[in-house]
Image: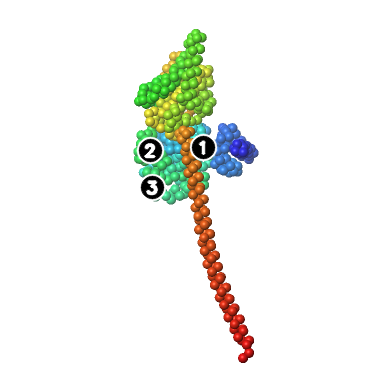
Amino acid sequence: MAEHEPQQGEQDLEKKIEETRQRFNNELLQDSTDKYDSRDVEKFQQDDALVEAYLTWRLYVVDDALKMIDESLLWRKEFGINDVSESTIPRWMFETGAVYLHGYDKEGNKLFWFKVKLHIKDAKSVVDKKKYVAFWLERYAKKEPGMLLTVVFDMTDSGISNIDMDFVKYVINCFKVYYPKFLSKMIIVDMPWIMNAAWKIVKSWLGPEAIAKLKFASKAEVQTFIGPEFLPPHLGGTDPFTYTYPPLPDDDFQTPLCENGPIISEDDMESKEGEMESRDTLESSFNSEMAKPKKVNFLEDSLRSEDGERDTNMRVKRVRNPQTTFKGLLLDVSPAEELSFGSGENERKCLIILSNVTKNQVAFKVRTTAPEKYRVKPSSSSCEPGASVDIVVSLHGGSQASPQDRFLIMAAEMENAGSQELAQFWKEVPKNKVMEHRLHCHVQDSVKPAANSRRDSLVETSTSGQQELNTALMRVMVCNSRLEQKMNSCLWVQKVLTGLVLVLLVLNLQCLYLLGTAQRPC
């Protein structure tokens, strides 16, 4: 029965998606095929997740979802969103640094910063400013599909001249209509008291589905949502980031401290012999997989295959194998979405498997948003056609993983693999030929040993049983006290009634006596 309910829910969702598409074609596309951008229509017809996002944001009411879809697609065509690029937006907008993406909140959502003090209301540039916001949203939607955003309005040193209610309403509509299911929360930081009236108006625009996502915070309170490592110093943080242009911030990804091959660090020196053995076997497997093919005899080949099997078994024991795979144009990446870390000794390493699906050699490199916390082996190398490369990502020293941490895997096809060096290759390769795939970190709770969990469960069971017994006894005692009170009241009533009966009896006797004396002859 429990398995049947999710299947039923999926079937209902599929019916809703199909109904939405049919009504879209019959009601919204019937008048004119030029009403919307054909690229948006094609994506709507093929992307179930997009339709589901509209339905979810409108509580699965198809009529409301269709109104939202119509408004969203009309806006996309009016502003030419599919053609918005860095070259179509005035350069000075990028140089001001009023809007940009950088850092993550404590839930791992990307931060979308609005520096309010840098915004000046200007009717001539309002369209370009709206396209500028759309540029950042489109850029993030393509690079991190399905991931939420946290909007931060930094109102430090801002005043009435910086408030543009039309622009604020547009930003809200971006998340309310144009980009459904995209907003995690909207944080208003350090708002001057004189702007309270303006933000009361903003609340009326949000609607019930988004009003709960609006958070007001002072400089001291903002750290409940965002860690100090992603807050600028003027908000009490330690983030040294300074926005500059060009180029655009590359999603905060940096090259890990550890480059190719083994490194000798404090945590490696202090590790146990078992870990040293595992590291050696892992590194030997890397070397054997990445080495160029050469002629060997059959005996050496068989011995190497046996060693490879042993290395693989050791790797499986020491590092957990990924269970999901992302199918890319150049490489298949396992796992598909996230690396899971824990606090246990065996949970501080993760395995990434890259499989070359092309007919040429593919160069790859791994970057991360927290290079000081992770060691990546190898962080840059190449993969032969049809081969696979194992990458071990391990936490360095006493570092702990967090949901804000991200990994970027970049890959490009090498046409002249023999003469090219990787460093020079990455300088010359065009950006449009580079495949990118992002992984985020998942922090899992440590599992207690079976004996401890069993003992804890027994203790919890006995404790809960004792509590239930105490509760039952208390209830019995309360019932007894209530019965006692009722019995006392009944006895009191009984005594009163007995007294009344005696009084009536005396009165009756007195009446009889008076009647008897009255009937006697004088």
Position in image of residue 365 (x %, y %): 44, 23
Q: Of 518 and 259, which appears nearest the observer? A: 518
| Real-space Cα separation, disc 3 to disc 2, in angstroms | 22 Å
Ranked by sequence position, the earlier of labels 3 and 1 is 1
| Residue that label 1 marks | 79
Alpha-carbon distance for marks 1 and 2? 37 Å
In the rendering, at what x and y percent does residue 497 appear? 56, 70
Tell me which label, 3 or 2, sits earlier in the chain. Answer: 3
Name the disc covering residue 228, or none.
Answer: 2
Q: Alpha-carbon distance for marks 3 and 1?
A: 33 Å
Which amino acid type corresponds to the residue marked 2 in the rendered image?
Answer: Pro
- Name the residue located 51 percent from the left edge and 42 percent from the top edge: 176
Q: Which of marks 1 and 2 is in front?
A: 2
Task: State which quarter of the image contains the N terminus.
Answer: top right
In the rendered image, which residue does mark 3 sit on? 192
Comes first in the chain, label 1 or label 2: 1
Marks 3 and 1: which is nearer the front?
A: 3
Q: Which residue is drawn at 50% across and 48% down?
A: 469
Residue visible at 40% across and 22% down in the picture: 273
